[in-house]
Amino acid sequence: MTATASTPSTRQVQRAVTGDPDLGPFALLPGTWANRPGLPGRGWNMIALPFAQPAGSTFRPNYRLLLNQYDEVLNFTLVDKAVPNRGIGPVGGVVVNTDQTVVTLDYEQGIRQIKADDFPRSGLAGAPDLAIHHEPGLFLNMLDQIDGPDIARLATIPHGDAALALGTATAAEGVPAIPTVNALPIGVDQDVDGNPYLLPYKHFRDAPFEGLFDPTDPTALLTAANQDPAITIHRTTKLEFDTTVATGGIHNIPFIVSQANASEMKSTFWIQEITDASGAAGLRLQYVQVVQLDFFPRSDGGPGRIKWPHVSINTLEKQSDVAPAPGYQAMP
C-alpha cells in the first residue's frame, strides 16, 4: 500500500474527520461511539481473579469469576498525519532513503459498570455506576514500507500494562460472522460439568448473568444483536489486532507479572454500515477482546501457568462524527 495523494508531506496533528482517506480502514471511526441512548447495557465483561477463599468456603480453589454489564463511551479525536519512520535500503544497487509514513488516530475508552456479580461471592463486585476501565491509545495506519501487518493498536491501561497489537483490515458486504470464543481456562480439564475446579463457570452457564450472559459462550450476544430485524447491515469493515504476531507484545509492571500476568491480547472490531427500519443510515461498532491472564500452576503438564481468558464484548452506535472539544470527559 502506498500513501494517497491527499497525505500531507509534513507532519500535521488535527481534529479527526469521518471519511478522511488518509485514515484508510479507520475512516469511519472519528467521533463518539456509545451505548446510550440507543443501545444501553450491551457491554459485557468476564474475568477470573485470584481470590483467597474465606475459612469454611465449600469452593477451595483461590479464584473467583467476576462478570460485569457496562456502558461505554469510545472517542476517536485527533489524527497525527505523515508521522515519519526513518530508514534506508538498497534500490537498484544504490542505498536510498526508504522512510515509512504512519497515520495515527487517537482514542480514549471509558467504561462504567451497570451491574456486577461474582462466584464465589466476594463482596468486591462493586456498586452500579462505577468506573471500571479507562484506556487511552492509538490506532496506526501504516501506509508504505510494510513488512507484514499494516495496522496496529497501542493501548495503555492504568493497572500497569502497555500493549502493541498488530494486524490487518478487511471489508465485506453484509453481516459479519462472529466467531465463538473458548473462554475457559487453558491448562486444566475443560469439562465444565465434570471438573469441580470450573464451578464458577458452571454456575453462570446454568444461570446466565442478568439472564443473558453465558461466560462459556461470550460472543453469543454479538451474534444475537446482528439478527435484530430492525436493522440491515450493508457492509462491515473488520479490524483484527493480535499481540502474539510479528513484533507485538504486552509489558506489565512487576506486580502484574507475578500475580496475574497479562500475556496476550487479541481483539476484533466490526464497523458496520447499517440502515434502520425507517431506512435511515447509521453506523454500529462491535468488538470482542480476549486478554490472557496467567496465574496458578497448570494441571495438564503444559508450560507456564494457567491462562485465564478475560473477555469483553460490546455493541455501540455512532453518536457524532464531530470529535469532542479538548477537555471532554470520557466517563461523565
Image (cartoon, grey):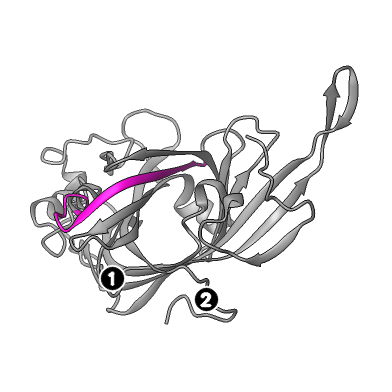
Q: Nearer the viewer, mark 1 or mark 2?
A: 2
Element type at marker 2?
loop
Q: Is residue 116 magenta?
A: no
Element type at marker 1?
loop
Q: Quadrant of residue 276?
A: bottom left
Q: Amino acid at mark 1?
A: Ala
Q: Which residue is mark 1?
A: 125
Q: Residue at x 33, y 37 (%)?
A: 186
Task: Pick out the residue farthest to the left.
Answer: 206
Q: Which residues are magenta?
A: 225-243
Relative vertical location of residue 84 with respect to residue 124 in this rendering, above or below: above
Viewer-side residue, 126 vs 110: 110
Q: Residue at x 65, y 51 (%)?
A: 103
**Image quadrant in which the C terminus is located:** bottom left
Q: Amino acid at mark 2?
A: Pro
Q: Earlier in the sequence, mark 1 or mark 2?
A: 1
Q: Quadrant of residue 39?
A: bottom left
Q: Is residue 77 visible?
A: yes
Residue 273 location (% of width, % of height): 34, 52
The disc placed on residue 324 is 2
Q: Is residue 164 visible?
A: no
Left or right relative to 202: residue 147: right
Q: Residue at x 44, y 31 (%)?
A: 303
Which SS does the magenta portion mostly show? strand
Q: Quadrant of residue 240?
A: top left
Viewer-side residue, 114 vs 195: 114
Relative vertical location of residue 332 with respect to residue 235 in this rendering, above or below: below
Residue 193 location (% of width, % of height): 11, 40
